[in-house]
Image: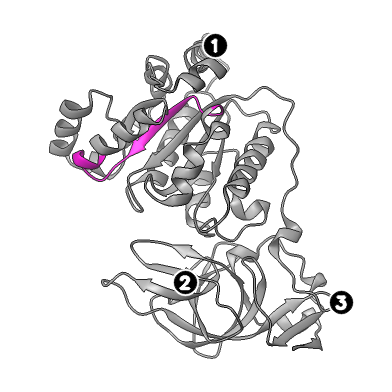
Amino acid sequence: MDMIYNFNSAQLIHAKSAYTTRRISFSAIQSLITGFCQPLSGDLVLARVDEIGQHKRLELADGRKAKLFPGDEVILCYGHRYAPDQFEAEVPPDLRSCHLVAAGGLAGQVIKQNLTIDPPTTLTPLGLLGDSDGKPLNIKKWGLNVESSARKRPLTIAVIGSSMNSGKTTTAAYLIRGLVKAGLTVGAAKVTGTGAGNDPWFMKDAGASIVVDFTDVGFASTYKLPVEDLHLIFEQLMGHIIDTNVDAIIVEVADGIYQDETSYLIESYEFLKSIDGVIFAAGDAVGAVGGVTWLKQHGLPIIGIGGLLTTSPLAIDETRKSVHLPVWDLDDLSHPSILSLIQSSNPIRSSEQIQQSHQPILPQYCQAISKIYNSKAVNGKNS
């Protein structure tokens, strides 16, 4: 049986509130729910830090990495996690002792761990945070609710990778930098993954005028979500950015192409019809070859290769010989000429359905943008 205690949000003044909770209104917190209750992904939990392990800091709502100490009280979200370099974790069935499974603020029960990292930081949940009626509060309550935009979708490039830490976010950020230097207003979205601020902050620092992720529409993590929710996240984030009237959108999809939620999303009609080109981030030539083959088989318009492999000139040579596609390092991506390089690409879609239902706008769009940019430069308006 649940036990509900009246609770004043002022009591949370010393608790460290994580990135995943940054959209919540603390005034809504009026109760603490304990006892035999089953948390759901996205539910807010007040927990005590017991033993410091892998995660020694907690990313706060403002992006600061706060040092954790045993005895700290923290406000997190329950959520599942999939991270081959760290943990696989799931939401526990009750308020038993659990773990901090992501620095962005995810509480879960570790079920698999990479052997190269420390054991997880352990937590004791003190209770779910609830409203005045004693109902658990979930971050979905504060998620954006976006209708499909009536505006025309701008140029949209997806960055997809071979695995976690293959260089996707760095590729996306440097591409944003190059397009901004070419005179475009760029928006960015991270549409899958685990709630954390590092990637959105990086893309914002690169010059994106707006950056959103799945936490903005009320999801702490996308692991184990049904396909319908993945589509909802993608459509709402895209609609929100399109309404800001940007010239281009960069979409990052987390993890690798064999991760379930990633493959479910990028194989879908909803995704394919909304993407004009894909840059594939890989760690080595073998990963690049396998990724390009998979993307072409699934009708995705691959236009270039980037990622961790571009730190090695020899790996670049191997990749170019093997995939016959442009390989763009960080200097290439961050140079304004990336716009013309994208313009000259000729993405091939092998899916007959997508060819019939959606004609890529990339070449025509880039030509139009190039004309605008060149006109600005001639008139001395582009610094």
Crowding at mark 3 (Cα within 10 Å: few <14, some 14-19, many 20+): few
Where is residue 231? Give x, y as percent: 60, 42
Question: Nearest the camera: 14 or 189?
Answer: 189
Question: Nearest the camera: 154 or 287?
Answer: 287
Left or right relative to 72: residue 159: left
Question: Nearest the camera: 89 or 166?
Answer: 89
Res. 135 in view: yes
Task: Decide: is 64 above or below 328.
Answer: below
Task: Quote the CA–CA distance across marks 3 and 2.
Answer: 30 Å
What mark, if any, has residue 133 been given in the picture? Answer: 3
Toward which corner of the image does residue 171 lie, by quadrant? top left
Toward which corner of the image does residue 248 lie, by quadrant? top right
Q: Amino acid at mark 3?
A: Asp
User: Which residue does the numbered mark 1 point to in the structure image?
Assistant: 368
- Earlier sequence position, callout 1 versus callout 3: 3
Where is residue 369? Give x, y as percent: 54, 15
Task: Decide: is 329 above or below 21.
Answer: above
